[in-house]
Image (cartoon, grey):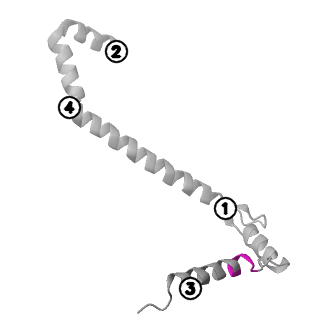
Amino acid sequence: MKLFDDKKYGYLEHALKAAYHQREVPEPGIRWKQNVMRAIRRLEPLNGNGTFKPITFVQHFVWRFATVACFVLAMLLGYMWYTELNPIDNVTDRFRDDPVQLTIVQVYEEF
């Protein structure tokens, strides 16, 4: 059982659209604007009443730096694991290829 047939449904839809478009748009009053501006002035880093805390900026910087540093470290560790990069192997390969030159370089680096 239908409550509305298509013709009545279309008429109702048209009437609701017309009522929606003819409504009055409420304007925010001066009190609302004052409250918004007061809330903006109370934001922590921007308030000028002597409660500026530089530690908030330092904490923000430290956490961003820590995030980036961990990401870079993870990328480097992944690269080293993927390429099997090991400094001991590099020194051993250089010594095996030319032991005299490596020994002379080590002697001159000490002085």
Measured along the vertical axis of the image, is residue 86 above or below residue 64? above
Residue 88 highlighted magenta (yes or no) = no
Question: Alpha-carbon distance for marks 1 and 3?
Answer: 65 Å
Label pair 3/4, CB-CB below 8 angstroms? no
Query: What is the distance, in whole Å, between disc 3 and disc 2 at their CAs?
Result: 96 Å
Q: Which residues are magenta?
A: 19-23
Of the two numbered discs 1 and 3 on the same chain, state the one appearing first in sequence.
Answer: 3
Task: Give the percent coordinates (x, y) of residue 107.
Answer: 28, 12
Residue 110 percent location from the top left of the image: 33, 16
Q: Residue at x 75, y 73 (%)?
A: 36
Q: Amino acid at mark 2?
A: Glu
Label placed on residue 8:
3
Query: Which numbered tag is attached to residue 26?
Result: none
Q: Amino acid at mark 1?
A: Lys
Residue 65 at what x, y percent from top left?
Answer: 49, 48
Mark 1 — residue?
A: 53
Q: Earlier in the sequence, mark 4 or mark 1?
A: 1
Pointer 1 with pointer 3, Cβ within 8 A:
no
Q: Answer yes or no: do the residues labelled 3 and 2 have beta carbons within 8 Å?
A: no
Real-space Cα separation, disc 4 to disc 2, in angstroms? 27 Å
What's under tag 4, amino acid-wise?
A: Glu
User: Which tag is nearer the camera, tag 4 or tag 1?
Assistant: 4
Q: Amino acid at mark 3?
A: Lys
Task: State left or right for residue 93 relative to residue 9.
Answer: left
In this rendering, the label closer to the viewer, 1 or 2:
1
| Separation of marks 1 and 2 at Cα, in angstroms | 49 Å
Question: Which of the two residues, 14 or 80, is positioned nearer the viewer here?
Answer: 14
The secondary element bearing badge 2 is classed as: helix
Check disc 3 and report its element: helix, strand or loop.
helix
Kindly identify which residue carries mark 2: 109
Q: Look at the numbered disc 4 and give the secondary structure of its residue.
A: loop
Question: Which residue is depicted at the point 24% across and 11% down?
Answer: 102
